[in-house]
Image (tube, rainbow, N blue to C red):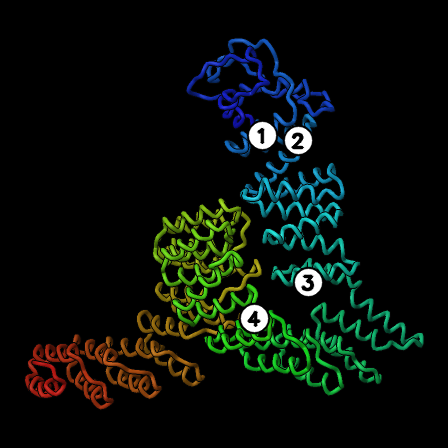
Amino acid sequence: MLNRIGHQCQSLFRLPFPWLSSSTLILTKCSSLLSAESLELEPSTTSPAANGSFPSGILSLFKLKLSGSSGVKLLGVKHRFKPLNSTQVDDEIIDHLRNDDPDSAVELFELLKNEYRFKHSRVSQLVIAHVLASQRRLRLLRSNFKQMLQEEGSGSGPSLCEPLSVDFKNWKSNAIVWDMLAFAYSRSNMVHDALCIIAKMKDFNIQPSILTYNSLLHNLRHSESMWDVYNDIKETGIQETKQTNSILVDGLCSIQDALKLTNDMVKHGVNPDSVTYNTLAKGFHVLGKINGASKMIQETLSKGLNPNSITYTLLICGNCQEGKVDESMNLKNEMVSYGYQVNFISYSVLVSSLCKIGRVDEALCLLYEMEIEGLKPDVVMYSVIIHGFCKQGEIQKAIQVYMEMCNNRIFPNVFTHRAVLLGFCGRGSLFEARKHFDMLTSGDDIQDIVLYNIMINKYAKLGMNHESIQLFDQITERGINPTIVTFNSLIYGFCKARDLIGAMRSFHNIGDHGLVPNAVTYTTLMNVFCEEGNMQKVFDMKKEMESNGVEPTHVTYTVIIKSLCKQKKLQESLLQINHMFSHGIFPDEVSYNILIQSFCKAREIEKAFELHDEMMSHNLKPDAVTYNILMNGLCVYGDLHDADKLLLYLKEHNFELKKAAYTILIKAHCVKGDVDQAKVVFSEMVEMGFEVSVRDYSAVINRLCKRCLTYEAKGFFRMMINNGVIPDIRVYTVLMYAFHFVGDLHSVHELLPNMVKCGIDS
């Protein structure tokens, strides 16, 4: 720390600080800077003054020593520093160091606070909080906030929101500071203040972390408010942790205790009523144990009690959550048969679940059924159906539902607009998509960053980076805050165009908007560096990713595996699979396919098949790409007879082969001169219904002619004619050259009439 503060001394002494006596220091400027040894700290035993001024003992905080190599010549020291107040220290020294040397700012802040019990201003504490957040020093940040809130006390949340939302609004890492402040309030048992901070965060589209939510859940676990927080977690889509579920179980006092209490009721002659069983069913539902909830319903019926509509609703929701949509539909019908009216929640969940599995027409029928039953669908339900049709590419149906919604005086919201725009960008026309987008964003009423993200992502995928940048500029001009999704799309577009300069420029701009790169950001860049052959940069990005605490995904690991395989570090690439499993991340078919291909190229065919078996042991189904790789490996580096056996095995097990599997094998047999087997496989390919073009025949004929197997080439030529495929000039040229080369003039004369028939001038 001393070395860094010494580094700052020259610039500090040049500042126009009125509290420095003109006779305090006379310095001569040298080219070198103060060494660490030229500064000495002299802690004070004096307590801070009541008016917040700098304690007199600390006035000799920097005592300069005579040192020939120090770079600063001390000509005279007549007085110590004059007393400083907190405003001068915080607003001038701390703020200056924050810009030039953040590490020194933090260390000086901590030194003054801990050693000299100096009381920093609220603004200075928030400044240092942002510095710590940008450096990911979250433990110290939490500690500082804890101490700060002890001084501020309960009810201070609203007053802290004001400077954060005004003075620090556009600072880097502002989102992290908000989240850590909410967490600190919660850990300090100031729940109302924590909820106040979170409410303000939502106004700025800042999402609390699961850590903060878990802390709130813990504080509220024995109150009804716990469910409000839990529903908030569900709505935001944050990934729950094991701690989240543990807190919920604790909040329910655990379902086992509830069951034990129910059994004790029966033993003592107190018969549980439908309310008791319905409560138990709710407990099972919350814990995700639908079978337990169903059992409660059966017990209710067996005792002659009737489950109420709430119980059925819980079961319908639970089954839908587990993907058992048909069971939920049956429960809905059973509910009606008992005389209960299906409520809005049940319809809403069923409509959403049907759309998720592509049964959008059935969902629309349920919506009409609701209207008949006197229930009015809301804008969310309409939006889900519109999105479902758009996802299937049925844009006209989506527009029809959109018009019906408007006719029913249910006005579209941002979710509806997003659904339609996604539909246009997915399978619709780019022109229509942009037209719809421009219509939505033409005024100031809708300033939804998600709409911009959808459009930018579409342009990025099409390689239209100029249009993406234009939209990004429009975002900044309108004062709309971009999200990390915005930058990820821009980076993807640049990477797709192999514009690494543009990609890195966008990457470095992320922090300027108070955002933090995520796994998608790093993985996208790592992948393009891998494709460019810059493996060092791949691993540099991986190291930066780890240092910033960003958890890799299975795609990240796949890119690392690909990079190691390109460097022929196959054993290291295998270790990455083990790392994935140890961290609870599961590889997919792509990860294994890369490994299998690399081992095939290394002529380790046996290991490639071991990896194939390992895939299956992890419930991963090898796809057509996997078998094409293995087929090619056997044909090029292994035994061709084994390749034939593999093809036979796959056919016998009704595996849907791709055309490439056949063409690989045909090519190999042609190269090895086994023309009869090549004909057999080629005929099988035709029989399987694959579209066989002139290019496929040409490839075989060309390889046979290269080996001077002209008789066999004529056989494939006849097969081509018989199957109605018209030869092109390349086929004739190859055959004519081969016949001339072997002196087969008879075949040349036979071929000429066919050329004339096809309109090819000999």
Residue type, numbered disc 4: Ser
Does residue 594 appear left or right of residue 46 in this picture? Answer: left
Q: Which residue is mark 2?
A: 120
Residue 280, image x, y percentages: 79, 72
Q: Secondary structure at mark 3?
A: helix
Q: Residue at x 57, y 82 (%)?
A: 362
Residue 199, image x, y percentages: 67, 52
Q: State which quarter of the image contains the C terminus.
A: bottom left
Tell me if mark 2 has few (under 14), some (14-19) or many (20+) residues whose alpha carbon lies within 10 angstroms of its own.
many
Question: Residue 376, relative to residue 71: is it above or below?
Answer: below
Q: Which residue is mark 1?
A: 94
Q: State which quarter of the image contains the N terminus.
A: top right
Q: Which residue is mark 3?
A: 231
Q: CA distance from mark 4 to mark 3?
A: 20 Å
Q: CA distance from mark 2 to mark 3?
A: 39 Å
Residue type, numbered disc 2: His
Q: Secondary structure at mark 4?
A: helix
Q: Earlier in the sequence, mark 1 or mark 4?
A: 1
Q: Residue at x 55, y 12 (%)?
A: 22
Q: Earlier in the sequence, mark 2 or mark 3?
A: 2
